[in-house]
Image: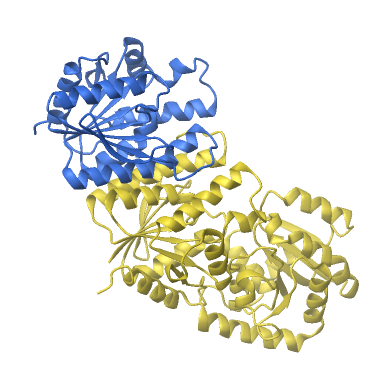
Chain colours: A blue, B yellow
Amino acid sequence: MALRKVLVLTPEYPPRMLGDVSINVHSVSRGMVKDGILTSVVTFDDWRPGETVEEGIRVSRIASPIRTFYSILTWTPLVTPEFVRASSNIIRGEGVDLMLSFEWTTGISAMTIMTIHNLPLVCIYHSVESQRNPSHDSPISQGISYLEREVANAADIVVATNDDTATILRGEYGIRAKKIAVTRLGKDVRPLISICRRAVEVHEGPNI
Amino acid sequence: MRVLIFSWEYPPRKVGGLATHVYELSKALAKKVEVHVITCNFPGTLELESVDGAIVHRINVYSAPSPDFLTWTMLMNASLLRAGCALTSERRFDTIHCHDWLVAQACITLKHATGTPLVATIHSTESGRRHGIHTNYQRVIHEIEGWLTYEASRIVCCSWSMVNEVAGLFNVPRDKIWMIPNGVDPEMYRPSAIDQSLRDRYADPSEKIVLYVGRLVPEKGVNVLLGAAPRILSAHPKTKFIIVGEGYSKEMLSSFTKSLGIDRKVFFTGYVSDEEIKGLLGLADVQVVPSIYEPFGIVCLEAMASGIPVVASDTGGLSEIVEDSVTGLKVPTDNSDAIANAVNRLLSDDALRGSMSKRARERAIERFSWKAIADLTTRMYDSLFPV
């Protein structure tokens, strides 16, 4: 199957910027559109829910249905149904060939969609919990690591944006080296697009 | 029709009345439609089994580390959701049926992923359980309940009092809510001969037995019953109070019993099996259901089906189950004196106990059989697909 339509799930997208993820997702999405790939982004943004087309990219911004924040580990599953709702509408409406999921916070959504809609999944990690939180022995940290590992296991290909993250994915998370690709994200998205094409080729069905 | 039920508890994993409800309802439904239940695993149980036709999928939900119950619940949902995804990718379901907020996230996600209509049974509300919303923790649960009522195409409440509560709290249109009561199996709960060896474990031969069955948490009002005990003992010194159940108030209730000087007359059994509860119902002279908040009150119905006269708080679903002075005695909530008067009246009047016992069982069979409840539930499912 050719790679013509991509669905991107991300916790942040401009103008909402918490770190590098937002900038990189924006670059990746623009690069894909430039390469002729129809690109839809579903992202979280409590202040701007709705759908727009920006620079040729269809952007769906969702809000959390639960307004009270308790912890990141409860927030993530609670925002999942909205990610899945917006994504499923896109898949049913125009079809999608591959899903790109950024960071663990979109992982439960990505695993759900890949199973129900039988889509190839590439998940991208800028970092993992043990890099962000070196003494990651709290239950919250362990819970995050657990979800990171689950998503990486389910994905067809796991992209690490640096060698350290790739090493942890292999060593601590037990992800097969063959499944991990290391590529830096920037203006040149050709390496990532070629990884995505490979994911479409190797995808055999739901991985969970 | 094919129905996918989500519930965090299912026998033998029992926390409250929810497990029994889902167990009985799924069995009764399986006689009419194809039913799958996704639930949490439990040591010693099968991952997949057919329970009288209902296919039960028990999922490992204990792999993820969690700092507290709310976080654990969310990660449990992630595990149940994965199982639901795997199952729905194999076969199409006509309805997803969610039981309470604890599995709302998995059910709502699956609804959006598959386009399957969602039905939710709200067994109780956080606001009702806590007498309002006081903390962020409670607010999150309250918001999840509201979100579930918004996302569900049909909402089931087990009493009119719950219909009013849910409609009022979450601004739910009345025509979206179906009142379908809880049920009881009249074959399982029936008047039985006294098990003498069981009786000997709890009471002297000459003692009358006042029974409480339920969780030991503030909303159940066990302290109100214990507060009534001195007055009951003064009128009927040969009385034993058997308190069945577990809960975080247990230590406080035990201390309260000691402070009243009645600890030799009160027996806290802790958790006991269903079989033993049935045996204890056979021993009891009176069952007291002193709840402060009670959406339905299945233990009251089980006592009625067993032919045990009940003294129940005039609140929530209990008000609708018990007909005062006919199938039991109703008392105002949080009123130890009223409980003492009602229990004393029943313990003093064998004829009254006999007539109430008979009428209570008749009422339980007539109005609360699981077959009737399954019939109503399938009608509610059918209403999702107007011809």
Q: Is residue B238 left or right of residue B120?
A: right
Residue A179, x across and y down, in percent:
23, 22
Q: Residue at x 24, y 48 (%)?
A: B89
Determine whether, in the image, residue A184 is placed left or right of residue B22. left
Residue B384: image x %, image y %?
32, 68
Q: Place residue A84 in its image quadrant.
A: top left
> Residue placed farthest to the top in the image?
A163
Q: Quadrant of the C terminus of chain B?
A: bottom left
Is B15 placed above or below B355 here?
above
Q: Nearer the viewer, residue B69 or B252?
A: B69
Which quadrant is home to the N terminus of chain B?
bottom left
- The one nearer the camera, B149 or B373, is B149
Count of numbered badges drawn on the protein: 0
What residue appears at the point 67 percent right and 70 percent down from the top-left corner? B315
Name the spot of residue A163 as percent of width and height, x first: 31, 10
* Residue in front for this viewpoint, B42 or A26: A26
Q: Position of residue B6 (x, y in %)?
A: 41, 55
In this picture, residue A146 sits left or right of residue A189: right
Snapshot quadrant of residue B237: bottom right
Which of A46 and B303 lies nearest the eye of the viewer?
A46
Can residue B192 be seen here? The reply is no
Residue at point 47%, 37% (across, down): A75
Which corner quadrant of the image does residue B371 belong to? Answer: bottom left
Residue ID at (15%, 24%): A34
Q: Is residue B161 visible?
A: yes
Q: Farthest residue in the left direction? A: A1
Q: Would residue B73 appear left or right of B231 to someone viewing this image?
A: left
